[in-house]
Amino acid sequence: MNRGAILEGMTCRSPAELSALLDVSLTAAQREYILLYYREGLKMSEIARRCGVAPSTVSRTIARAAKRLRRAAVIANAIKPRHS
């Protein structure tokens, strides 16, 4: 799985916006795996070993988290107030 492709096309205006999306959109496991994968740069097999789950579980969880983040980002951008 390509790290860049997972969140392709998703943009956040600030680290605070991304942090808020992570907090409100993801389960604890999804948030943990996303942070370990992107922030810590761990491989999925390393995350699986560390968390005591199968690598396929990590892969599926990250993919589902990315989908939820993309959906939440679209919704957040759609309801943001316009500044004149």
Image (tube, grey):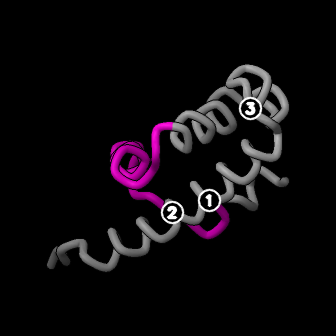
Q: Residues within 10 Å of mark 2 (few under 14, many from 20)?
A: some
Q: Amino acid at mark 3?
A: Val
Q: Amino acid at mark 1?
A: Arg
**SS class of the residue under badge 3?**
loop
The image shows residue 68, relative to residue 49, as above or below, that is below
Q: Residues within 10 Å of mark 1 (few under 14, many from 20)?
A: some
Residue, far left: 84
Front residue of this view, candidates 80 and 67: 67
Q: Where residue 71 sits in the image (x, y, percent)?
A: 47, 71
Q: Amino acid at mark 2?
A: Arg
Q: Quadrant of residue 45?
A: top right
Task: Report the residue marked by disc 3.
Answer: 53
Image quadrant containing the C terminus? bottom left
Residue, far top: 50
Q: Which mark is residue 68?
A: 2
Q: Which residues are magenta?
A: 7-28
The image shows residue 32, relative to residue 10, as above or below, that is above
Task: Report the residue marked by disc 1.
Answer: 64
